[in-house]
Image (cartoon, grey):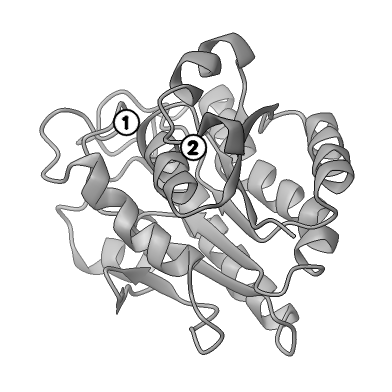
Amino acid sequence: MRKNVLITGANRGLGLELSRQLNKLGYFVWMGVRNEEAAKTVKATLADPSQAAIIILNMQDSDSFNKVHDTILSADGHLDILINNAGVMLEEDLMKNSAASITAQQLKATFEVNFFGPVLLTNRLLPLLLKSKAPRIVNVSTNMGSQQMQAMIPELPKTFAYNASKAALNTYTIHLSSLLQGTLVKVNSVHPGWVKTDMGGPYAPLEIEDGVRSILEMALLDENGATGKFVHKGEEVAW
């Protein structure tokens, strides 16, 4: 029985590097993307493209979640790792407090991709994860979504929609891990750090290869690993 992983937002940045790393480790990688044609080129850069497949996944379209479930069920019958990586930041100025200027459209779209999508997708795929011998769910978050850090560190970016959506995703991590106590499933949030991606920008201190390390650690936890945590490089982050 092959080991398999679904990575959302797998066509670039952290998602693509996660696809490459897990592919090297022998996992069959389901690359969740919105644009199949654009993803074909990057899929070819994997060490073993035959052990990967592009799967259409729109985080704003719950119908695509059903298709993803059915495709993985038909091919594998189970899912070992789910990495909820896809995300958007629609505020243009990272250093501007957008609490009073955020538009309804920006707020809604941000929560659809960063919160509602991951929750509904995960819930839909949970029956497949429960069939795995070592199921792992990793929610890619940010320390900007830490309520405690936001309250204590005025300099932390105040991109309201993005931060609030990640705080909500962290809440889902806490609740889902509590629900799944007594099962083999481990659910954790990860702060990858400030990474040189399209979202992080060119001035971020971490390269993409460094940014995926914390995510991989949680995805590959052994049976004694933690669940219901918010971590960065093995250290807990304040909720």
Q: In this view, does 120 lie above or below 10?
A: below
Residue at left offset 29%, top offset 61%: 150
x, y percentage for residue 86? Answer: 52, 38
Residue at left offset 79%, top offset 37%: 68
The number of callouts visible is 2
Mark toward the start of the polypeptide (1 vs 2):
2
Q: Is residue 103 above or below residue 26?
A: above
Q: Is residue 236 left or right of 173 when viewed as pictured?
A: left
- Can you see residue 28? yes
Secondary structure of the residue carrying numbered label 1? loop
Amino acid type assigned to the residue bearing label 2 in the image: Gly
Residue at left offset 43%, top offset 41%: 162
x, y percentage for residue 76? Answer: 80, 50
Q: In which quarter of the image is the N terminus?
A: bottom right
Q: Name the residue under label 1.
A: 199
Q: Which residue lies furthest to the top in this view?
A: 37
For mark 1, does the 10 Å Cα neighbourhood hold few (<14), some (14 to 19), or many (20 or more) residues? some
For mark 2, does the 10 Å Cα neighbourhood hold few (<14), some (14 to 19), or many (20 or more) residues? many
Q: Mark 2 points at which residue?
A: 87
Q: In this view, does 41 lie above or below 50?
A: above
Amino acid type assigned to the residue bearing label 1 in the image: Met
Q: Are marks 1 and 2 in contact (CB under 8 Å)?
A: yes
